[in-house]
Each structure stands twice: as structure tokens, then as C-alpha cells.
Image (tube, coloured by chain):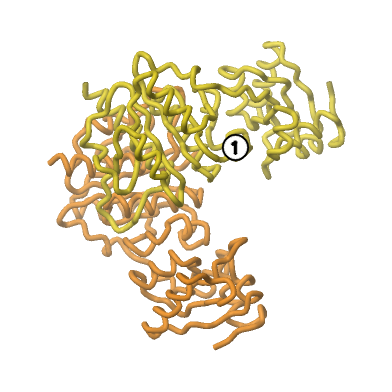
Chain colours: A yellow, B orange
Amino acid sequence: MNIDSPKNRHVRVARALQTTKGRREHGLFLAEGPGAVAEALMYGRGIEWVAWCEGLADAEGDEIADAARRAHIPVHQLSDEAFRALSDTQSPQGIAAVMRIEPATLDAIHIADGGAVLVAHEIRDPGNLGAMIRSADALGAVGIVLAGQCADPYQPKVVRATTGSLFHLPVVEADWSQVKSWADDQRVSLYATALEGRHTIGKVGIPKRVAFIIGNEAHGLPESILQDATYSVRIPMSGRAESLNAAVAAGIALFEAERQKLAG
Amino acid sequence: MNIDSPKNRHVRVARALQTTKGRREHGLFLAEGPGAVAEALMYGRGIEWVAWCEGLADAEGDEIADAARRAHIPVHQLSDEAFRALSDTQSPQGIAAVMRIEPATLDAIHIADGGAVLVAHEIRDPGNLGAMIRSADALGAVGIVLAGQCADPYQPKVVRATTGSLFHLPVVEADWSQVKSWADDQRVSLYATALEGRHTIGKVGIPKRVAFIIGNEAHGLPESILQDATYSVRIPMSGRAESLNAAVAAGIALFEAERQKLAG
């Protein structure tokens, strides 16, 4: 289908996905840019259709549109004006996928044979949340759980910051009580990060099945979660800064789990 | 002095500091919010004056304004309207400091007795650069060097993301050739991070005097820098993601240096 007008029904739906309300109403989100769409094609399910704009896409974008056609996914060719209308970026790259939101549950996380999980609790900044999903993926975590009121993982800023990792591992939204029951059932140790944590990341042993819990950017973790956790742990900080960025802290915890695994 | 009008000369200068051009023209930058101003008072030099707005500041802001007065720094009381005019944020907190930009040189980094330095090469995202300065501070680095075309560390987004760390350690802008000569002179090992790095962070020993070099978000480090470096190192990644966020990678490298130091 060729779509010239920014007022076309498909374009209006895709544009609505920039807002939480629109995503909730349609049960869809938008993955934009060649990297994200390529990863969605390779790992994601639930692509409804792909928007492609010949005037804005480069050779990579054209190839991805071809790959989508071969996978029998509808590819609509948009005019520059129509594509710019649905895009969230200032310099659109002419390729985007409209995808169904298919929420995963804790059962989707396969930890029985060991692995690390990242639990993001009330992480509000989209850039932080995106970087945490990307780190969880890169550093071999078997899933990421968004507990409490986190940023919406399907908003464009988060999708972009994950650079495709959103499609690589289970991203689960759950209440803390569900996380706690799941951890008890699956015999997963809960390592809660806190500035005053009792054990030191880098010194404390990390078990085969572990979940690292990272708290809100401003307030950290609530006392109730620190009580529920197996251990409270802190990252050793010898400088003057009070704390680390939440995404950096998550990356360090996951790296340490990997490092201990490599060290045998 | 009481300033009611947003058109007041002082307010216009402070407002101009939101842009690179304005900062360059005046040689000044703005540190906004109670946290940043408190850190500036404690560690920073070169505070020209403090803007305080009774209607917008909370008790903490009022205390900081008092502390500035006790330190004989001019505190101007602004009307809500005037303060909002100079503020970079949507919900201004009624306290800000206008500060002189006092560029540090590599000589300001004291590494003779050992320490880690972070070299950020062509880091373009203000949030990443701010998080890197914060991590360098938290994880005990003795300085951070911005090499090549990095984001301007004195822009409001970076100043905010450093949460005061901008005032805690030398932040040096330098060319790569200067960094290389300095490292040779000071016998500092250059560890360049790369996806295809030969040695693995977490396995390779980290010397007493080390600089970790982190490359651009999209392109990594140029071949010439990898050639100049003592080692190329990679962070072990067992997942599907191609790479880590630059600030997360920097945090992991600095953490590993700290961990080895703690392990003796």
C-alpha cells in the first residue's frame, strides 16, 4: 500500500503510539530506525506492519523493508510527509515497525539452570530504563523485571535506548509481591543494592541464581524490599559522589556476576 | 540586590548560559538546583553570584542561600518570573549559581601515587557524559579527560547529570596527542575499550596508574587510538546485544580497577 497523506488512518494510529494513552488504546508500540526494526524482525514477534519511506531510508533501510516483505509482513510505503508524521525523531531514517505489545510474565524467565535477573524498581528515567534493558541483555541476564511504577518500556525513548535488546530477553512488568513469591519458588537469591548495603559487590559471592534489585533514581529501594531481600549489597565507592547513576549500578552488578562465572 | 524583571541584565546573562555561544561569550556557566549549588559552595571555585527565589526555594534552598551569604558570595533575590527566565528546568527549585568556567589542564590530575583516569573520546550524549563524570567521581578516579569533540560539560543537562561531581575532580578538555604525551610522561597505562578488545576486563590485571579510554556511542574508538593504547580491552558480553551504553562501560571498567585494588 502507498500512503501519501499524514492524515491516513494507519499513520494516525502509528503517531498515537508516541503517547502512553495511544499505546494502551491500541495495544501497539512503534520500533523506529533500521537497528530496531532489524532486531524486531529477527527476534520479535507481533509485527503488525512496517512503515518504509524511500525518500528517507538508506540502503540498509531498503534491505530491511525487503526482508519484512519476504517474511510476509505488510510493508507500507509512506511519503516523506507521512513518515515524518509518525516519527518520534528529528531526523527520521525512513523505517519503523508497528508492533503488538505482548506482555511477558515471570514464567517467561528461564532461571532453573542458573542465571541473573535484573529487577528495576520504580526507575523513572526512560534513558536509564533503556540502558538497563540493554545491559541486562549484553551481560547475559535471563530477564528483566520492572517492578512498581517504572517508566513505560514501550515509549519511543526507551525502545531507542535499548538498541534492540527489548526483543532479546523477557521484559516483565510485575508487583514486588509477585517478584518475591517467584524468587522463593525458584530459589533465586535477592540481592538488593543500597548505599548502606551490608555486603560489598566485588567481594561477596554471587550465587548461580540471583536477582539484583536496583531502586529509584532519587529514593533508592524502600525498607520493605531491603527486608525481603536475601542480602543488601553496595558498590564500593571511594570518591566524593554520593551515588552512581542507576543504569551504571545495574551494569556493575551484572558484570560482577559474569566475572565470577568466568573465574569459575 | 532584588531583581524583579526577567529583562534585568544579570538575568539575561544567566539565561544566555543555556547556550554554548552564551557560555563562550561570558566564560560562565549555570549550576542549578540545591544539590548542585551546595556542592559548588563546598568544592567549586569561581562562583560569581547566586540566584535565589523565595517563592520557589524550599528550606534547603533557603539554607544554601544563607551559606552563600556567609561565604561573602553575592546572593540576588529574584522574583518568580525572573528566576523562571534564567532556569533551564520546567520546575525550577529557586536556587542557582552563576560560575566561572575555569578549564583544568592535564597537570591538575594527580596520578603519581597511583589512580585511574577516565578518558571520554567523542562522547556526544550529555546524559552519558554526565553519568561518566559522576561514575569517575564515585568510583575514585583521579580525573576525567574529554578528548576529541565531546558534549560541552558546562551545558545544563551535563551539569545536572553529574549531580555535583563536576566540582569534585579535575574535568580536563584535551587533544588525544596531549593525552598520549601525558600518559607517556606519567607512566600511565592506556586501556582502550573496544568490542574486539584483546584482553578481558575482569581477567586482565589493572596497573596502579591507568587510564580507561571510552569511545563514541556509535563508532567506538578510532584505529589510531587503539594503536597508541597499551592494551585494547573488552567487557565480557554473553548476551545478544552488540554493545553496552558508553556510561555503563565506563562504570564497569572503573569498578574493576577498584575491585582489584580492594582485593589487594
In the image, B128 versus A107, the foreground residue is: A107
**Residue at 60% over, 40% down:** A157
Q: Chain of mark 1?
A: A
Percent position (x, y) of residue B159? 47, 60
**Residue at 60% over, 78% down:** B11
Q: Is residue A237 left or right of residue A179?
A: left
Residue B222 shows in the view: no
**Residue at 79% over, 36% down:** A80
Q: Is residue A244 above or below residue B48?
A: above
Q: Is residue B256 left or right of residue A243?
A: left
Q: Is residue B180 left or right of residue A119?
A: left
In the image, A173 versus B104, the foreground residue is: A173
Q: Is residue A198 above or below residue B112?
A: above
Residue A209 shows in the view: yes
Q: Is residue A236 above or below residue B112?
A: above
Q: Is residue B172 above or below residue A91?
A: below
Percent position (x, y) of residue B80? 63, 75
Q: Amino acid at mark 1?
A: Asp
Q: In this figure, which residue is indicated by the disc labeled 1?
A: A152
Percent position (x, y) of residue A106? 49, 22
The image quadrant of residue B25 is bottom right
Tag 1 secondary structure? loop
In the image, A61 versus A220, the foreground residue is: A220
Quarter holding the C terminus of chain B is: top left
